Every structure is written in C-alpha cells, then in structure tokens.
Image (tube, coloured by chain):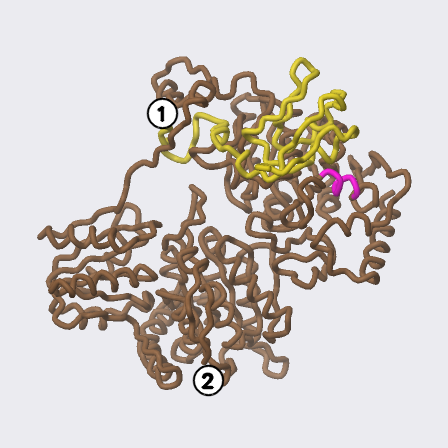
Chain colours: A yellow, B brown
C-alpha cells in the first residue's frame, strides 16, 4: 500500500506520522506498579506524546510502540507507581 | 602551513579568521550552523579579533555586514536557501553600494517544499545580484576561495561582494584533510581593508547609498563592467596565490583535457566525481576530459571557449534548472559555444548526491546518443509504503481522487479525533512544547485552522508522507506566520466559516524573525490566537541564541553565556492593547482557562508559553514538567493575563524558592558563578515585584 504525492505540497490524509515507531528510541521503559496506581491520570495529562490512556477510566495503558521513554510520567507520578527500567536488561 | 582535518563549515570560519574579518553576523539556518558555531567559538575564546552580531533574521545579518563594510571594516556572513532568498534586497543593496563583503553560501534548496538538502536554487536565484560567485569542490578550495574573494572583491577595479558556495551537507558536514595557511602568508597575500570609496569619517564626511536620478542604468553598467574587469583581477590573484601558497587556481579547472573529444562540465563537489570517472574512461582509452566551472560570475567565456573549441561532445551537469527553460549552467555553456556548435547535452541532477557509477551511467547514455538532449536525473514520484497494520486506520489515500470526482469522502484518518496532533512525531523525548501544543489543540477542537512557522514542530509534522496534524494546518515560512494567518482569517470570514485561527510559532518565528509580521497582524485587529512556544533558542538548528534566550544562558552562539536580557515579548504584545496571557505546560488547568478566554475575546489574543527544552537546555528529559514548575515557583516566570491594559496575576507561588533551584537543573547554566546567580536572583526579584 502506498501514498501518492499530490501537486503543490498538500496532503489529504493526516496523522501518517503514526507509522513512525518512536518506541525504538527508548533507553528506559516505563513499568507500572498497578498496586500503587490509583488512577489520578496525572501521568496521562503530562505525557508529551499523548500515549498514556486509562481504559474504562481505571487501567493504565502506555503505548510502547510510540513511548520515547522520557520518564516524565514516572517523575510526575505522586505515588511513585511508575519505574523507568533500562531496555534490554 | 599545517595539515588539519576539518569540515568545510569549519574551514569557512577559519578562512574568515585568516582574512582578519572584523565583523561577523549570521542567522541560524541549517546547514550554515557549523560555520557560525565555529566563528562564535573562535571569537569568544579570543582566537579571532572580531565582533559577532547575532541577529533576528537574514536581512539583518546581511545589513549588519553591509553596515560594517560601509563603515570601513571587513565583514562576513553565511547563509543559504530561504535565508539567502530572504536577504535578496539587502544583497542587491550591498553590491550597489560596492561593499566587498563575503557570503559563504552553504547551498540549500528553496521551498516550498521546505528542505535542508542542497541544490543551487538559492545561489543561482541570486545570479544577477552583481556578486562574484565561486563554487568550491572541497574544503581546501573553500578556505582558499574565501581568502581570494576578499582580495579580488576589494580590488578597486572590482569593488563588489562575493558568494563562496560550499554545498550543504555534502561539504558542510563532511571532513577532509586541509592545508591550513599560516597567518603571515595570508597577511602577505591579503593586505588590510582600507577603502577609499566607502567609509565613515567625521573629518572626511561622505554620503552613501544614493538614489538614481538619470544614472540608474549607468550604475548597472558600472556593476557589469566591474564584473567583466574582475576576470583579469581573478587571473592575477590566482597567480599571486600560487606564488605564496603553491596551489594553482583559475576561473575554470580543466582536467585531462588534452585531446579530449568529450567533456563533462560541472560545478561544486560533483566535479570530484567527474574527475574520478574521467580517469576510469581514460584507463579504457576513451578520450574524455572534465571542466570544472569554479567561477560562475563573472562568467568565464574566454576560458570555456579555449578549452572546448575542438571538443565534439559536451555533457553539462546542472544542480539547478530554470523552471520553464533549461539548466542554468547548460544555457550559458551553450551560449558561450555558439560559434563551435558541439553536441551539448544536459543532466539536471538537482539535489541528488551523485555517486561515480551514477554519473558514469549518465555519461554512457550521452556517449551512445548522437543528438543533444536534456534530461532530469532520477525523476520518479517517491512513494511511501504504509505498513499494513495502519492501512485501515489511515486509509484516505484515495481521498483526493474521490474529492475530485465529487464522490463522498469518508475521512477515517481524522474520524472521532480528540487529539489533533498525530502520534510518532519526531520531536525529542520529553518535549514540553509538544505537550503544550497538544493541549491547546484539544481545547480549541476541530474547527480550528493552524498556520505555523518554521520550527521544531514544523520539522516533525510537515512531511508529505508523514503528516503530523489531524486538523486543517499549513506551514508557510519562518517570518510570515502571522501575516499568513491574517490572510486565512479574512478568507474564512468571507466564506462564512467561523473557525478559530491559531497562529503557532517558536520564539524565533514569533519574537525574532516573525515580529514584524506579528505586530502588523495584531495591529490590524484580526481575531486570531497567536501562540508563542518559547524554548529560548533556535532549537531546530541546534540551539543558537535567540532574543528570548535567558540572561547568561549558554547556547551554540553564546558559549560563555548570553550577555543580554531576555526580550519580554509578552510585554511588547501588551503594548498592542490586546489580550495577552502567559502560561506553562506544568499548569494545564491555567493554560486551559487562558486558551478558552483567548477564543472568546473580541480581537487578537497572544499566548506566551515557556516550554523547557531538554535538548537545548540540557537537562534530564524526565524533568521537563519539574523545570517548568520551578520556573513558576522561583518567580522567574509569572502567570498572568492582561486585557485592556490591565494586568491580572493568575497565580502566585506561596513561598518563592531561590532561582538557583531552577538554574541548577540545567547544564546551560552550569558555568554560572555564585555572583552571577546572585545577579539573576536580583533581576528575578525586581521583575517579580514590578509585575505583582
């Protein structure tokens, strides 16, 4: 499947950066301790890439396909429920 | 002389140092940043006796150089692409005023589409600006050409500025061994600049930059004659140069031209490739030679005729084609060879890096054919392959085809979107700008049009095959986002579309190069929200100082810390009598309130958001929100709104923390002494008291 280029630098299909697996950049991976997590959603608010979601308003999911591992979520979590763990160890 | 290993960017900077340039002024644009970074280093560490003026846009860089040169000092700038185009008027002014400054052009294509790859569309667009144009093949030629350019340009028979082209990335970012000339040898070759035609002296007052009465065409003729005269001056300078430095140069450089029946003509670093394949052909007994056009203006007709009078076939490689006509170099070569009529063919190679096998393929083709022809190399529409897992989600590939046919288009790619910035954006991990922008868009919602300036955000969202927006958005230029927004708003109003227009820019696009457009647009009273994401430097080009960089902060162009204060763009906008609010990505409810207010107010609104940048400010990416919070808690960044000239504080820190807590997290402040920290604390205290 492929995208064709339209004359004049206009794009008629948006959000195609979604192909870009920024998760590959990650050095540290966020690991959530579900025991500690009381879904206050602070991590979700502050995630620059908007990839922390709370399903049914409860369970936290982090989309690791895109997570760049910046660690803002872990740093902002008031209950220290997120640990940043080195990838590949 | 000593042999060193340098990039062409660095050699350009060293050339300016060796030429004893006194005034340097440039504006950050990829790929010239290596030149200005090295110059800053040389000046700030005392290795070069010159002043560097960090300006807010390319016209200013050229103007600073022209101003300094008109006062009587040698000056130097470096730019490319859009930057050279933006300088256009000032370039013509400088040649008209006979100011022999030197512009290092780190060539880059002119957009749209925005690009950082190199072709000659920038420098060729200034073909007729009455500049001497040197095209370098390698780093050695860059250093030698710049030194020679001053000698030639300052000759009273010439008195014109020069471009020295070093191809972007192909040369600016590659390293080579270079013979670094000794200062004494350069001093022997290049005397001090002591102009007799243009300078400022109270005891001998003169007027510069006159308007034309009946002399306009005569002045143009003068410039033309100066360039024609320059040919002899160049020839002499090349001889002098050879005597001192031992390296031989001329206007053109013939290579294995004896008995050649076919000749490859090129400019810039692809000439090295041409030489390589010529050797291969010669090894197989095929009589081919190469001719490098080193000086394009003045155009060396005589040398070209002499070199090619007996040649049967000429193959010209052009990095730029004049749209609707022909390759620019090809046209001129053809014209020079009118009397001899060899078979002349043209390959437009544009921005492509040409490997020897590719050039050989093209030459083989020209050897096989007997006619003259023109061909664009490697022209096919680039196609992006979409991974299957995304195909359903983003299918919309045929949207345009359906729209043209008048069919109903179901936009799956943006259906039910609440997050209007896409995922997978190439912005650094922990980018707080991305967070703030995402938040603002989600508050404003679907009926929003976003014109945005050149910035990190633009670079990450604006590729044809990787579009990062999910609402109507458009990139214009670096300096004109507010004006483009005016046009969009007027048109939307006329079409009865009640949309919010959000003009987005960084501190460069809003407070520096874009300030004129912003002020004009705001003054006209369009109902537009202007958002300045202030990360306090030109981060997209590698963290060069901007006017909103903090006092004493280290950047690539302020290695020992910025000596000037941060420009208070919010106060400037307050003076326009509009709604102004300051915000931080760490206080999102406050940001939300202000965005909604900005949407409601009758007239323009300006949002100034400080966005800590982990890469440029050099802190742990996990700390973006913490740094942002500390900016508030130390009183360094005040959260306030201003409407009708009345300022309201949104929120005050309970117990103000010492500013050191904010500074110590960032490497850009690591060099500060306790006294300097004390000084910043005093300034923060004063501003806090003034505003609260």
Q: Is residue B490 visible?
A: no
Magenta-drawn stretch contains B628:
yes
Nearest the camera: B156 or B210?
B156
> Magenta span covers which residues?
B625-630
Magenta stretch prevailing secondary structure? helix
Q: Residue B185 — which label?
A: 2
Q: Residue furthest left?
A: B370
Judged left or right of residue B306, residue A29 is right
Residue B381 placement (x, y as % from top left): 31, 36
Q: Residue at x 59, y 50 (%)?
A: B513
Q: Nearer the viewer, mark 2 or mark 1?
A: 1
Instruction: Name the residue tied to disc 1.
Output: A1
Nearest the camera: B427 or A64?
A64
Q: Chain of mark 1?
A: A
Judged left or right of residue B329, residue B24 is right
Q: Is residue B270 visible?
A: yes
B457, above or below B103, in the image: above
Residue B583 placement (x, y as % from top left): 74, 37
């Amino acid at each position: 499947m492929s995208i064709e280029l339209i004359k004049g630098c206009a794009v008629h299909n948006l959000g195609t950066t979604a192909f870009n697996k920024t998760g590959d950049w990650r050095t540290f991976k966020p690991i959530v301790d579900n025991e500690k997590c009381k879904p206050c959603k602070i991590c979700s608010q502050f995630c620059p890439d908007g990839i922390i979601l709370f399903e049914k308003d409860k369970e936290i999911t982090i989309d690791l396909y895109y997570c760049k591992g910046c660690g803002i979520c872990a740093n902002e979590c008031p209950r220290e429920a997120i640990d940043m763990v080195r990838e590949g160890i | 002389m000593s042999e060193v290993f340098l990039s062409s960017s660095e050699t350009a900077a060293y050339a300016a140092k060796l030429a004893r340039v006194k005034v340097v002024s440039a504006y950050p644009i990829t790929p010239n940043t290596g030149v200005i970074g090295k110059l800053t280093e040389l000046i700030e560490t005392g290795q070069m006796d010159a002043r560097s003026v960090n300006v807010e846009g390319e016209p200013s860089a050229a103007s600073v150089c022209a101003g300094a040169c008109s006062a009587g000092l040698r000056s130097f700038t470096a730019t490319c692409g859009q930057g050279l185009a933006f300088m256009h008027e000032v370039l013509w002014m400088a040649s008209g005023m006979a100011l022999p400054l030197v512009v290092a052009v780190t060539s880059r294509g002119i957009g749209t589409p925005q690009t950082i790859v190199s072709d000659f569309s920038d420098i060729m667009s200034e073909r007729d600006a009455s500049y001497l144009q040197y095209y370098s093949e390698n780093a050695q030629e860059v250093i030698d050409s710049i030194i020679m350019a001053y000698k030639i340009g300052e000759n009273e028979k010439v008195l014109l500025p020069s471009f020295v082209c070093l191809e972007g990335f192909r040369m600016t970012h590659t390293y080579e061994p270079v013979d670094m000339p000794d200062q004494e040898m350069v001093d022997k070759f290049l005397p001090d600049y002591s102009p007799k035609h243009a300078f400022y002296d109270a005891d001998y007052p003169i007027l510069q930059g006159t308007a034309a009465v009946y002399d306009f065409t005569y002045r143009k003729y003068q410039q033309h004659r100066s360039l024609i005269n320059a040919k002899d001056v160049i020839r002499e300078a090349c001889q002098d140069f050879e005597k001192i430095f031992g390296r031989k140069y001329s206007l053109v450089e013939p290579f294995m031209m004896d008995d050649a029946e076919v000749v490859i003509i090129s400019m810039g670093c692809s000439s090295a490739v041409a030489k390589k394949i010529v050797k291969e052909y010669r090894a197989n007994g095929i009589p081919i030679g190469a001719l490098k056009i080193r000086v394009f203006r003045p155009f060396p007709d005589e040398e070209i005729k002499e070199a090619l009078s007996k040649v049967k076939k000429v193959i010209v490689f052009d990095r730029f084609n004049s749209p609707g006509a022909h390759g620019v170099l090809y046209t001129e070569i053809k014209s020079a060879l009118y009397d001899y009529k060899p078979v002349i063919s043209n390959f437009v190679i544009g921005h492509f890096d040409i490997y020897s096998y590719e050039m050989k393929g093209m030459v083989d083709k020209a050897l096989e054919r007997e006619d003259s022809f023109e061909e664009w190399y490697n022209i096919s529409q680039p196609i992006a392959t979409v991974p299957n897992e995304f195909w359903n989600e983003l299918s919309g590939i045929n949207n345009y085809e359906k729209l043209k046919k008048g069919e109903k288009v179901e936009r799956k790619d943006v259906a039910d979107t609440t997050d209007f910035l896409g995922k997978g954006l190439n912005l650094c991990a922990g980018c707080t700008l991305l967070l703030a922008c995402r938040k603002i868009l989600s508050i404003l919602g679907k009926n929003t049009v976003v014109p945005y300036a050149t910035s990190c955000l633009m670079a990450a969202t604006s590729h044809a095959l990787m579009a990062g927006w999910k609402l109507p958005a458009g990139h214009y230029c670096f300096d004109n986002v507010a004006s483009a927004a005016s046009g969009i708003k007027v048109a939307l109003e006329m079409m009865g579309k009640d949309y919010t227009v959000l003009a987005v820019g960084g501190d460069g696009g809003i407070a520096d190069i874009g300030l004129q457009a912003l002020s004009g647009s705001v003054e006209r009273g369009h109902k537009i929200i202007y958002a300045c994401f202030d990360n306090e430097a030109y981060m997209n080009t590698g963290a060069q100082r901007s006017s909103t960089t903090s006092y004493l902060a280290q950047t690539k162009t302020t290695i020992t810390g910025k000596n000037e204060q941060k420009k208070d763009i919010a106060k400037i906008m307050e003076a326009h009598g509009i709604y102004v609010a300051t915000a931080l990505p760490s206080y999102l409810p406050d940001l939300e309130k202000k965005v909604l207010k900005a949407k409601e107010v009758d007239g323009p609104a300006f949002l100034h958001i400080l966005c800590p940048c982990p890469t440029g400010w050099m802190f742990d990416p996990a700390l973006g929100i913490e740094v942002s919070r500390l900016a508030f808690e130390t009183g360094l960044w005040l959260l306030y709104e201003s409407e009708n000239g009345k300022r309201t504080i949104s929120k005050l820190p309970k117990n103000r923390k010492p500013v050191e807590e904010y500074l110590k997290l960032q490497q850009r402040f690591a060099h500060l002494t306790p006294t300097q920290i004390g000084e910043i604390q005093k300034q923060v205290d004063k501003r806090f008291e003034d505003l609260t």
